[in-house]
Each structure stands twice: as structure tokens, then as C-alpha cells.
Amino acid sequence: MANSVVRIDKRDGKLAMAHFYVAFAALFIGGLAGLLQTLVRSGKYTLPAGIGYYQLLTVHGVLLGLVLTTFFIIGFLFSSLSKTAGTLSSKRRLAGWIGFWTMAIGTTSTATTILLGEASVLYTFYAPLQAHPFFYIGLALVVVGSWISGFAMFTHFGQWKKQNPGQVTPLLSFMAIMTMILWLVATLGVAASVLIQFIPWSFGWIETIDVLITRTLFWYFGHPLVYFWLLPAYMAWYVIIPKIIGGKIFSDALARLSFVLFLLFSIPVGFHHQLTEPGIDPNWKYLQVVLTFMVIIPSLMTAFSLFATFELYGRSKGAKGLFGWFRMLPWGDARFLAPFIGMLFFIPGGAGGIINASFQMNQVIHNTIWVTGHFHLTVAATVILTFFGIAYWLIPHLTGRVMTKAMNRLAVIQTIVWTIGMTFMSAAMHFAGLLGAPRRSAFSTYGDSAQAMEWVPYQIAQAIGGSILFIGIILIVIIFINLAFFAPKGETEFPVGEVSEEAEKTPMLLENWKLWVGVLLVLIFIAYSIPFVDMIQNAPPGAKPFKHIL
Ligand code: HAS
């Protein structure tokens, strides 16, 4: 237990903190863009200084969906490895810094093109919308930087394995590596489309682009991207939360198995974002829908495991009845409350995902603002609240400070504010989506048809939710700055849970990386090879660039 309080190496801490500074700056600017967007959609506000709606939407999506998440996650993964697999060697730390700066330069390049109005192509940058070449070059640099950091993590983990032959690896490190492998395999798709298609096309070296292939490569990346966001939250749920509440990890083997299943099934499912697209045989879409239903299983296992942890802890404290354990949980501790509310949000968020994935129901919600509601529940509530919960102990741990009672109270208020804001906003988005309100459209494009008028109350509710959320962003930025620079000096625990004595022994099969990566490659081959050949053989004439949207 004393080990938990031992601070991770200061130099590793600095590397992680560099990532968090960028992440929280992105949160502030991206959140501001989000607020303005909801105000524009309400129809009651017009953007000043010639700022375009899609420019704003691109700032919001890229900064929050790509920059905040990637930087936060890599900082968290480095910290977790340093804590559980030992201090990084100086070469690996240097690789981490090179990765960080490569990503930072890439982010600056991409952000500059967006702010100059040269890249209003949204975070999915669908062709034939065309951005400035430096938008794509920046994205490529972010990916390459993350790979450099990833390789530093892989070799660090490999060294632990070499020094501890035959032993089960530390759970948190295992999960960090699994997350990074998922990211590496997923980003191959986006790297290929940016390097082979978008960059040559945006420089004018090739005249046309294949729309379906670029979209397919994007979604080959885009769905595992969402699990790249989710898995670090699951790391906290499985390993950190049990320690915070004073309980035990229900089962090490079950936690590892769920991560293995995520690796296998999160990649060959990208077609479920393309169910309405022509050019892909419905049988292949059907196969990927089946695989999508497979990727729901590890989340259900996670829910089961968490219920078990909470219940076992509660009963050990004398709780009686079906839900007696509920009262035993540490509700006043923001490190617990924020991730727990994240879990609650994931119940409707996950149910919505199952609706989206159901071939026929997808026809009702596709391209409506329902989808935006879905991902605000999943990433902007479940994942982000968990990241906030992590920040409440990790930032002071890294900076050698402590969170005061007053800051904890502010963090509890922040969690409540976020919960209210997100409930308003995402519920309104789901209802408006069912009434057919499109996603990604400025109010001015709706016209004043009777149908558009039905959406108005929901747009206003979204604006109210968005404004409440912006208060939440101001609060979290205050807390972050306090924990990074002003909180009292002291020791903060890095809480790493222990596995319950009653859990079964972890089978070594779960550590067989060659096997799992091999199965993953076979699944990707089955799900994508024939449809891809089909797309190339039957490609329609390429598309010329389209630069101007409202
Ligand atoms: Fe999704 C679209 C299907 C999960 C994010 N998704 C999106 C987009 C994003 C996104 C960003 O099949 C939009 C992309 C774009 O711009 O176009 N999604 C799913 C499915 C799941 C799912 C089946 N999505 C996520 C997660 C995301 C995310 C996670 C981010 C982090 N999604 C889709 C589909 C589309 C889509 C289609 C395309 C729609 C279209 O047409 O465009 C599943 O993984 C969900 C499984 C989850 C569960 C919930 C388990 C619950 C747990 C909590 C337990 C609570 C406890 C506390 C223990 C089954 C683990 C309880 C305590 C008490 C006291 C009660």
C-alpha cells in the first residue's frame, strides 16, 4: 500500500504533464467553440467577424475529439507504465519527448489551417471537401508522433517481460499496451488515406480522389478510435476505482479478457458508420454489424465486473439487500463520483450504440443529430468525466501536491454541473434526431418549414445545456490550474487496486500477444479484403475538390 504513495519518477511525470497541458488547453478552446455552436443552432445568435459555422465545428471536433483525447491518453498511459512497469529509461523518455513534440507541431499545423479558414472540413475530413495540405500534414504528424511514443511504451513493457520471465504482467501496464496496439493498427488506415490520397490531392499532384476508399479508410480508423478513447476510462474503472473505494478488483483475468476482446472486435467494424453508403455489398455490411454486436460483449463484462466490485465492497462493510451497497460508496470523493456518473451515462450511451448498430434502425437515425447525442453521452460524458476523475489524483501526484477539501468540493460541483448540462444537451439531441433534425447543419440552412419549426425547442434546450457545460469547462480548468501550480505541496496516492483473493488465477494465454495480434489481422482481412478489392475494381470516376461549404 505504501508503494501507491511513492511518486513516479519526476522526469516521467514531466513528460506526462506536458501532454496534460496541451489536453486542457484544447479542452478550453474546443469547449468555447462548442458553446458558440449550440448558440448558433438555437437560431438566436450569429457568429461575429466572418467566422463560419463549419470552421467552428471543425475546431470543436478536432480539438476535443482528436487533440484533447490523444494527448490526455498518451500522458495517462506513460504514467501508468512508469508506475507499474518501472521508471522509463532515458532513451525511451527521449522517444516520448520526440513523440510529444512531433504531435505538438502537427497540432499547431492543423489548428492554424482551421483558424485561417482553410480547413473547414470537420473532424472526419470527408472527401471531396478539401483542406489546405498542412491540415493533413499536421494530422499525419500527430499520428507519427503517437507511434514514436507507442514504440517507447512497447519496448518498455518488453523489458519488464524480459526481466520477469513467466510472470503475469502488471494489469495496468497490460491495458496500456493493449490500448496502444489498438491505436497503432487503427491509425494505419488514416495514415494510408492521408499519405496516399489526401496530401497528393491537396497539393494538386493528383487531380481526383476516391471518395469511398477514403471514407472506408477513415472508418477503419474511426471506430477503433472511439475504443481508444474508452479503454483508458476502462483502465480507471477496473484498476483505479476499486482502490479509491477501498475494495478489490473482482477478477484480473476478466479484465484482461475484455481488453483482448476489444482489440479483436473494435477494428473490423467500420462499415457500421457506412450502412447507408452505396458501393459496399450489404452482405459485408451485415458481417460487420455482427462483429459490432460482438464488441458490445466486453462492455457488458465490464458492467458485470464493476457491479461485482461495488457489491463485494458494500457487503464487506455490512450492506444488506439488493442495493444496500449503493449507500456505502464514497459519494463525496470527486475521484469516485465523476467516473461513476460516467458509468451511469454509459448505460443510455451504450443502448443508443446498439440502436445505431442495428441495420434497420440505423436508417432512422443516420446523419441526424441523434448520433451527436450518442457520442456526447459516450465520449463527452462517460469518457471525459472519467478523465476528469483521473486528473483529480494524477495531476497532484505528478506535481507533488494535494487536492484540498475545497478543491474536491469544487470538483463535486463540476461533476454535477457537467451532468446537468450533458443531460439537457444530449437528451435534446436524441429527441430532435428522432424528429429528423440533421446533424452538422447551421440553423440558416433549415428554412422555416413546419418540420424545422418542430426542432426549435430542442435547439434551445441544447443551447441551455451547452451553456451549462461551458461553466463546467471553466470549473475544470480552474481545478486543473490549481492542481498543477497552486495546490499545497504534499504526497498524493496513485491508486492501483489489488485483485480479490477469491479471483481465479490469470491464464497465461491472455498474455499471448502473437496469438491475439494474429487473430486480429485475420479478422481484419476477412472483414475488409474482398470489399476493398471490390471498391478498387469498380471505382467510379474520382472526385474533384470541393472547397466551399457554408
Ligand atoms: Fe458509437 C457513432 C455504435 C460505443 C462514439 N459513436 C458514433 C460516433 C461517435 C461514437 C463519436 O453502429 C459518431 C461518429 C461520426 O462522427 O459519425 N457505439 C456503437 C456501439 C457501441 C458504441 C454498438 N460510441 C461508443 C463509444 C464511443 C462512441 C464507447 C466513444 C467513447 N456508434 C455506433 C454506430 C454509430 C456510432 C453504429 C454510427 C451511427 C451512424 O449512423 O452514423 C458499443 O460499444 C456500446 C456498448 C456499451 C454498453 C454499455 C455498458 C455499460 C457500462 C456501464 C456500467 C455502469 C455501472 C454503474 C457499473 C453495452 C459498462 C451502474 C450503477 C448503477 C447504480 C446502475
Image (tube, rainbow, N blue to C red):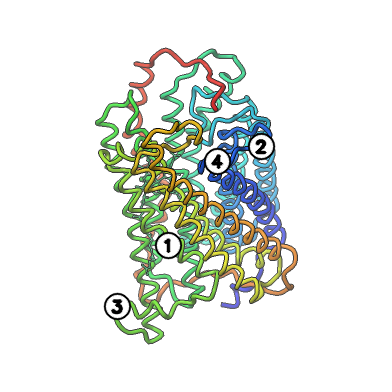
Which tag, 1 or 4, sits closer to the chain's start?
Answer: 4
Residue behind mark 3: 322
Name the spot of residue 146 as percent of width and height, x first.
Answer: 59, 43
Residue 523 lies left or right of residue 481; in this view the side is left
Amino acid type at image mark 1: Met
Residue at 28% from the left image edge and 32% from the top image edge: 284
Q: Nearer the viewer, mark 4 or mark 3?
A: 4
Residue 507, above or below 430: below
Q: Nearer the viewer, mark 1 or mark 4?
A: 4
Amino acid type at image mark 3: Leu
State the CA–CA distance, disc 4 to disc 3: 47 Å
Residue behind mark 1: 343
Residue behind mark 4: 40
Disc 4 and disc 2 in contact, CB within 8 angstroms: no
Does mark 1's beta carbon lie closer than 8 Å to ligand 1? yes
Residue behind mark 2: 48
Q: Quadrant of residue 247?
A: bottom left
Report the disc number at residue 318.
none
Name the spot of residue 418 as percent of width and height, x first.
Answer: 53, 60
State the CA–CA distance, disc 1 to disc 3: 19 Å
**Local SS, label 1:** helix
Disc 1 and disc 3 in contact, CB within 8 angstroms: no
Quadrant holding the C terminus = top right
Disc 2 and disc 3 in contact, CB within 8 angstroms: no
Q: Determine crowd level at label 2: few under 14, some 14-19, many 20+ residues with C-alpha closer than 10 A.
A: few
